[in-house]
Amino acid sequence: MKISKPLGIILIIAVNIAIDQISKVLVRANFAYGETKRLIGDVFVMQYVENTGAFLGMGSDMNPTLKLILLLILPTLVLGYLIYYILTNKDLDKVSIIALSCIAGGGIANVFDRIVFKSVTDFFHIDLGGVFRTGIFNVADMSVTFGMIALLLATIVFKKKNKA
């Protein structure tokens, strides 16, 4: 059975939003704010925090009007355009469609948090002993990151195919 392009896109976006929101509900229900649980020693840790800013808390102390514009209105407009672009662009390959849909799903999930909770629930942290260390992030952030990496790889592969 073949799924239509619009239905497939909506399904990918919805699954990304659902997994993110379910994970956040579970964290809020099972962690005290600031509580840390070690999953794999100090390498993979869960710590429940609420991020009122953007990536890694940047902008947390912004003026409320500026925060509304930069963290809610602008992302909503960009995400709306991104979904329109994915649905209407006939030249996108499957990897790009999946990548852009993951970016949209992750973005929508975090904007939803900002609207409903006035912050974004974050809870994952990875520390590979100074070699690689992340801030605290969530499943929506993973969706956006996966989408960006897949889009970059699809672009590189597409350019190599066109040169050949």
Image (cartoon, helix red, strand yellow):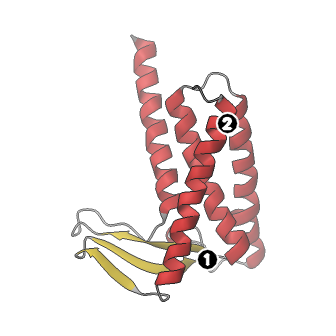
Q: Would residue 81 be seen by someone viewing this image from the given angle?
A: yes
Contact (Cβ within 8 Å) of mark 2 with mark 1: no
Residue at 23% x, 68% y is: 130
Residue highlighted by disc 2: 7
First reached walking from the N terminus: tag 2 or tag 1: 2
Q: Is residue 103 above or below residue 38?
A: above
Q: Return the mark for residue 137.
A: none
Residue at 74% x, 38% y is: 84
Q: Would residue 104 be seen by someone viewing this image from the given angle?
A: no
Q: Residue furthest top?
A: 164
Closer to the camera in the image, 125 or 38: 38
Element type at mark 1: loop
- Mark 1, Cα crowd under 10 Å, few <14 / some 14-19 / many 20+, is many
For this view, does 70 lie left or right of residue 49?
A: right
Q: CA distance from mark 2 to mark 1?
A: 33 Å
Quadrant into which the N terminus falls: top right
For this view, does 105 lie left or right of residue 26?
A: right
Residue highlighted by disc 1: 52
Amino acid type assigned to the residue bearing label 2 in the image: Leu
Picture coordinates of residue 94 (x, y %)?
A: 53, 28
The part of the image, by quadrant, that contains residue 110 is: bottom right
Residue at 42% x, 87% y is: 35
Closer to the camera in the image, 130 or 40: 40
Q: Is residue 83 above or below residue 44?
A: above
For this view, does 132 lie left or right of residue 110?
A: left
Picture coordinates of residue 105 (x, y %)?
A: 60, 51
Picture coordinates of residue 12 (x, y %)?
A: 58, 44
The part of the image, by quadrant, that contains residue 71 is: bottom right
**Figure disc tally:** 2
